[in-house]
């Protein structure tokens, strides 16, 4: 489940970058200022999401949303049901303590559905494909973001900031003398209603 949420977050991040930067005038304004790492990361991201819609499909169907078609869930269910190695997963025991959950089986069906999107019959290979794609995308998104922020800084502030004033603080307290209390006693604090002046106008 956590991996699906991670995939959804990465896909959403790329959507933001693609719509608000890549396909906007901002690209031309800052592209030349990006360092080589940022340019390469952006190029890799564009190629990855152009060649493969796997992460976006997982986000749309199993990460942030439910599958639109019941046929996909039914197909995943049938595939798992025919797998003799998973027979023990269908043995369910009802609890007397008021908590019965089909979470494990539901998650297994989702995993099979993702494997179908990956066109993999082996769940381990599907997992490996998902991990490889989301890891690659997240690494390049982080690298591009770092480079993009640096480009904005250079464009508006320059390569470095020259200080025009030098301030020297001589009476700063020692760090060991500073502390914030974990508990604060407010019992003696006067009531706001009692001390607040009247705001009514006078005639």
Image: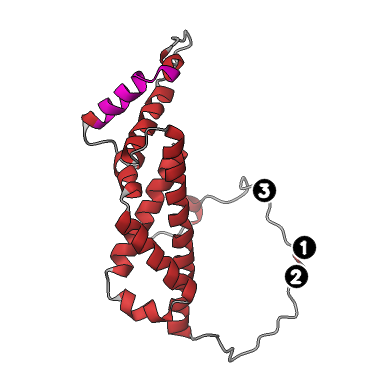
Closer to the N terminus: mark 3 or mark 2? 2
Find residue 182 and name its label.
3
Displayed quadrant of residue 81: top left
Residue occupying the far top of the picture = 96
Q: Is residue 202 left or right of residue 92?
A: left
- CA separation in Å, label 3 and label 1: 15 Å
- CA separation in Å, label 2 and label 1: 7 Å
Determine which residue is flagged by label 2. 173
Magenta stretch?
72-85
Q: Is residue 11 left or right of residue 193?
A: left
Q: Is residue 70 a member of the stretch shown in magenta?
A: no
Determine which residue is flagged by label 1. 177
Displayed quadrant of residue 61: top left
Q: Is residue 22 visible?
A: yes
Query: Label 1: how many residues lie within 10 Å, few (<14), some (14-19) or many (20+)?
Result: few
Closer to the N terminus: mark 3 or mark 1? 1
Is the residue under label 1 in contact with that under label 3 (CB below 8 Å)?
no
Q: Is the residue 80 above or below the residue 22 in the image?
A: above
Q: Is the residue 106 above or below the residue 19 in the image?
A: above
Q: Is residue 203 visible?
A: no
Is the residue under label 1 in contact with that under label 2 (CB below 8 Å)?
yes
Percent x, y for residue 122?
A: 41, 33
SS under mark 3: loop
- CA separation in Å, label 3 and label 2: 20 Å
């Amino acid at each position: 489940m956590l991996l699906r949420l991670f995939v959804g977050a990465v896909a959403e991040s790329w959507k933001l970058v693609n719509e608000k930067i890549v396909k906007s005038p901002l690209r031309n304004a800052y592209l030349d200022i990006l360092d080589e790492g940022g340019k390469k990361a952006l190029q890799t991201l564009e190629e990855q999401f152009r060649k493969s819609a796997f992460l976006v499909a997982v986000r749309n169907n199993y990460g942030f949303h439910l599958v639109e078609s019941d046929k996909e869930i039914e197909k995943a269910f049938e595939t798992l049901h025919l797998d003799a190695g998973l027979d023990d997963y269908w043995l369910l025991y009802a609890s007397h303590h008021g908590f019965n959950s089909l979470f494990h089986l539901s998650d297994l069906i989702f995993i099979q559905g993702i494997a179908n999107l990956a066109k993999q019959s082996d769940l381990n290979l599907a997992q490996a494909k998902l991990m490889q794609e989301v890891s690659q995308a997240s690494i390049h998104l982080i690298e591009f973001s770092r480079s993009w922020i640096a480009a904005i800084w250079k464009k508006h502030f320059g390569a470095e900031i020259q200080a025009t004033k030098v301030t020297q603080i001589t009476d700063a307290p020692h760090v060991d003398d500073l502390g914030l209390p974990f508990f604060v006693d407010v019992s003696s604090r006067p009531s706001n209603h009692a001390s607040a002046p009247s705001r009514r106008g006078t005639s």
